[in-house]
Amino acid sequence: MGRVALRGLLAVAVITLCLFVFGPLLWLASQAFATSWTYPNLLPDGLTTRWWKVVLDDPALGAAVQNSLTFAPLTVLISALVCLPAAYAFARREFPGRRAMLIGLFATNAFPKMGLFATMASLFYALNLMQTVLGILIVHVIGTVVFMTWIPAAAFASVPRSLEEAARDAGAKPLRVFFTVTLPLALPGIAVAAIMSFLASFDEAQGTYLVGAPDYMTMPTQMYSLILNYPPQVAAVFSIMLSVPSVLLLLLVRKHVMGGHLAEGFQIR
Amino acid sequence: MTTQAARATDGLRITGLVKRFGDRTVVDDLDLTVHPGELVSLLGPSGCGKTTTLRMVAGFLAADGGSIEIEGKDVVGLPPERRPSAMVFQNYALWPHMTVFKNVAYPLRLRRLPKHEVTDRVEHVLGLVNLLHHRDSRPATISGGEQQRAALARALVQEPQLLLLDEPLSNLDAKLRVKVREDIRELQQRLGITTVLVTHDQDEALSMSDRIAVMNGGRIEQVSAPDELYTDPRTEFVAGFVGQLNSLPGRLVGGRLVPEEGLLTGVRPEDVRLIPVDEPGASAAGHAPQDRLRGRVVRVVPRGAFHELVVEVEDRTLHSLAVGQSLPVGQEVYVDLARPLLFRDGRRLQER
Ligand SMILES: Nc1ncnc2c1ncn2[C@@H]1O[C@H](COP(=O)(O)OP(=O)(O)O)[C@@H](O)[C@H]1O
Ligand SMILES: [Mg+2]
């Protein structure tokens, strides 16, 4: 009796979970192919690929995709160049204000974003950064600083010092030790940080809209105008397109990064 | 004559080495000489400064004073990559993202040797440590003993003027430890590498070393050959740390203990002889009965080839080793103490 009840409960839990995970996705997918979908019908009124054509034929779309695919990698690159040395310093060196700075990094994410961008906007006007690629990149990089510092710092910190010392002992100068031992071992963590930064930049809409619109539209900001001008089916199509890079990257992470051979071959007592 | 003079500075020579952490002096005015081709162990309890000393020799820690000479050249002030020493780390510190071959080849690649020479030399050392079959394995996929040999190979391939081993066997299980220590010793003697070995295990030190430096509280108490260290300890600490020791206050006079301020008598368990009081002729041997120590066997611990007997003498317990026939618990015995070691304030008095 008890066992049956338990299994029933478990089944309900699993179904509920599936509903929460797959329900919205299913709804989104159906919506993207619906001619129309009116309350109180449980199913779409008919199926069509018309909305995909609307989106794909929109001349603004091409530009938006291109912008998104330019800004996101550039953001990751700049963020890495700025943050990785800082991450290494946080992991390996003691310096005054270290803890305060680590906590302070979170502050950039603690404020409501719109408030931060609004105050930044006045600064950007003064510096002539509005409607510029540089302005957009600055906004994007700010959104990635936490990922690009904290995760790689943890990755650097988890490289055992004796592995670096063994390289010094074998005759390598500090810079070579970094590139042949520390960096390769921290790479999985850095890759995760890069992917999260890419996605953060790819999805960034508020700041990009404020600084870049209407000259520089990215996929998320373009979605705003599509939602205003078209029926909901178009938004659904666009959402699916927006999620493609995320899904691809996550699959890539699963395949190549999760292995984590950091602890391998290293006996910790 | 000139070779003789050069010899004196060969090997490793440490003089007046000092290291402080904050206001704690962890290595205190330490002197040590290791002759070419010799293996010297730094033996001492945990926390006495062995690793700290070794890391100063390797160059990972800056000394606060003193000099370190390797093959006659002062290396204090040189970074680790420019010192002619190679170290085997306690946890092996193999690079997990490289194969065994690449781990061992790393030091040679840095020296920009031609590729075929790198391959030849790496394969040669891998052969020496019997690891050729794991040439292309990752460290994670080989056993602890094999990892240890890989780490040793990575040190040997550098043909160092000084080999440093930090507790090289502590991560191996007991069975393997005995075999590996023989292997390391055999290889070290065959290649004639000047070696410093750090260990807290007296068996390890006794079985592998030409000489042993016993460390205590950041200082070296005695440097001697293994046998001499046991039979001729210069301090109470050394006598107690290397081998077992019964400590009795006072001095032995005609078979009895006479209390005396600051004096202490040490006797090895194998020098504690027990004679049952009811044995015929027991009282005939040596002194008159009233002049002898008397005790009672309280515990018998079988140790395989011998028995360890715990004897209560007055209010003290003594340990004794008995080969062959053991005695029953409760047996009343005369206790004869041979070859006593006499210490005054911890230092050995040279009388026997
Ligand atoms: N980086 C350090 N900072 C402060 N104290 C240290 C440091 N390294 C070692 N010590 C202290 O120095 C003493 C000797 O350490 P160590 O050389 O590792 O001992 P051993 O190797 O003989 O066990 C210990 O008491 C240890 O706590
Ligand atoms: Mg140690």
Image (spheres, helix red, strand yellow):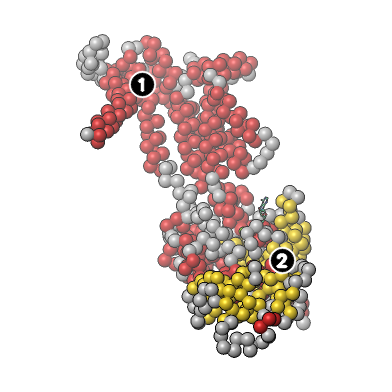
Q: Badge 1 is on which residue?
A: A238
* Residue B72 picture location, percent across and down: 73, 69
If the picture is divided into quarters, which one holds ligand 1?
A: bottom right
Mark drawn on residue A223: none
Q: Is residue B227 visible?
A: no
- Along the line of sight, which residue is nearer the eye, B50 or A233? B50
Disc 1: which chain? A
Residue visible at 52% across and 57% down in the picture? B94
Q: CA distance from mark 2 to mark 1?
A: 76 Å
Q: Is residue B62 left or right of residue B302?
A: right
> Which quadrant of the figure contains the N terminus of chain B?
bottom right
Q: Check chain identity for marks 2 and 1: say if they share one.
A: no
Mark drawn on residue B220: 2
How many residues crowd around disc 1 within 10 Å: few (fewer than 14), some, or many (20 or more)? many
Residue visible at 51% across and 71% down in the picture? B301
User: Which amino acid type corresponds to the residue marked 2 in the rendered image?
Assistant: Ile
- Along the line of sight, which residue is nearer the eye, B35 or B79? B35
How many residues crowd around disc 2 within 10 Å: few (fewer than 14), some, or many (20 or more)? many
User: Which amino acid type corresponds to the residue marked 1 in the rendered image?
Assistant: Phe
Callout 1 secondary element: helix
